[in-house]
Image (cartoon, grey):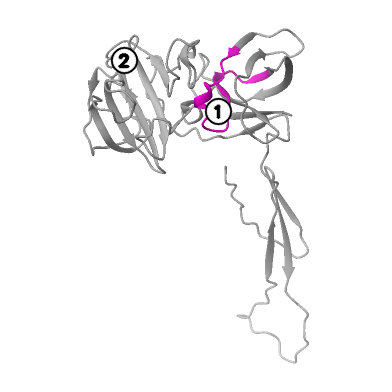
Amino acid sequence: MTRNLIKRFLVSPLLLILVSCANTPVIITPTVANTAVIATSTAPSPTETTISSVTPTITLTSEPPCDPSLVDYCISDGHFILRRPIQPPANDLIDPTYGYGSTASGTREPHHGVEFPNPTGTPVYAAAEGTVVFAGPDKEVIYAPWGNFYGNLVVIEHSDDLFTLYAHLSRIDVVVEQKVLAGDKIGEVGRTGGAVGSHLHFEVRRGEVEDYFATQNPEFWLIPAKDSDGNPFGTLMISVRDGGNTLIENANFTIGYYSEPSQGPNKIYYVTPYSPDMLLGEENAALGELPAGQYRIAVEMNGQILERWVAVESSKLTQVVFVVK
């Protein structure tokens, strides 16, 4: 959350100053020292000075955080702290046909990461500062239930038990225990292991890195990419829960983007929900790399359609929760 800096002001007696921040009003009430004058027979010397001291009392009040289960949607800064592992002019956009948690229409294993399609040899960069904990072919069963699944693999440990995985590499440029900084080249795109076509498979895991199901959707961690005009995209998180706050499986989503809400949609997105065994966090589905604007979400559940208008902002996370009772 953005921290606001309160500047110091020179406050005169009986002056009330109101400093307002986003959702955090700050009221400064001065307390004025007693300045009554006592008559004396001797005038003060030229070196003596009479001072009226002012000691401000600061009271902070803040609103509770936005709860998306109680309102139509919430917009926050999210935690977009990871640099994209592929940088322009190469393709730094995620392949939408095999998104996190999806199965490519039932033809593949539930996806534990995202893909960046690029030619073999495209540079791959560290997403954040950290330490390399694995670099080489995954011949043994360590990070997946199958050997040689990721092919040439690099795993980097970051702070707060966060790990990033870079798979199917054609070349590895780091070694175990090597310290890296965000943006350091660690390898090159390839198609080793179980890759279908040349691409980078990228994962984010938190906690136990060798747990295949410790993964999280990278779209909630990666710094948003930019459109052709240089405007950062926004990200949408959608949850469908029952009255007991449990995620409901197999919800279907249709999302329309409207640059002008009074007219028809500019684009329609048919969003695939996560596979049931990938409902590991707070959401059923996510949609990143969205232009800022108004969106209409339709959720189909048990023959019933729920609709809602939401806003998406550049470099922000919009969180939407549908409660089905």
x and y percentages locating residue 277 in the rendered image: 50, 25
Q: Quadrant of the C terminus?
A: top right
Residue ID for mark 1: 315
Taking the spot 27% from the left edge, 14% from the top edge, the residue there is 121
Residue closest to the far bottom: 41
Stretch of the chain drawn in magenta: 270-295
x and y percentages locating residue 204 in the rendered image: 41, 30
Give the left or right position of residue 27, taking residue 93 as reference. right
Kindly identify the amino acid type of the residue bearing the numbered disc 2.
Gly
Residue ID for mark 2: 194
Mark closer to the observer (1, 2): 2
The quarter of the displayed image where residue 249 is located = top right
Q: Earlier in the sequence, mark 1 or mark 2?
A: 2
The quarter of the displayed image where residue 34 is located = bottom right
Is residue 293 at least partly visible in the picture? yes
Between 46 and 113, the residue placed more toward the observer is 113
For disc 2, the neighbor class at 10 Å (few under 14, some 14 to 19, many from 20) is some
Disc number placed over residue 285 in the picture, else none = none
Between 82 and 269, the residue placed more toward the observer is 269
Would you say residue 90 sits in the magenta stretch? no
For disc 1, the neighbor class at 10 Å (few under 14, some 14 to 19, many from 20) is many
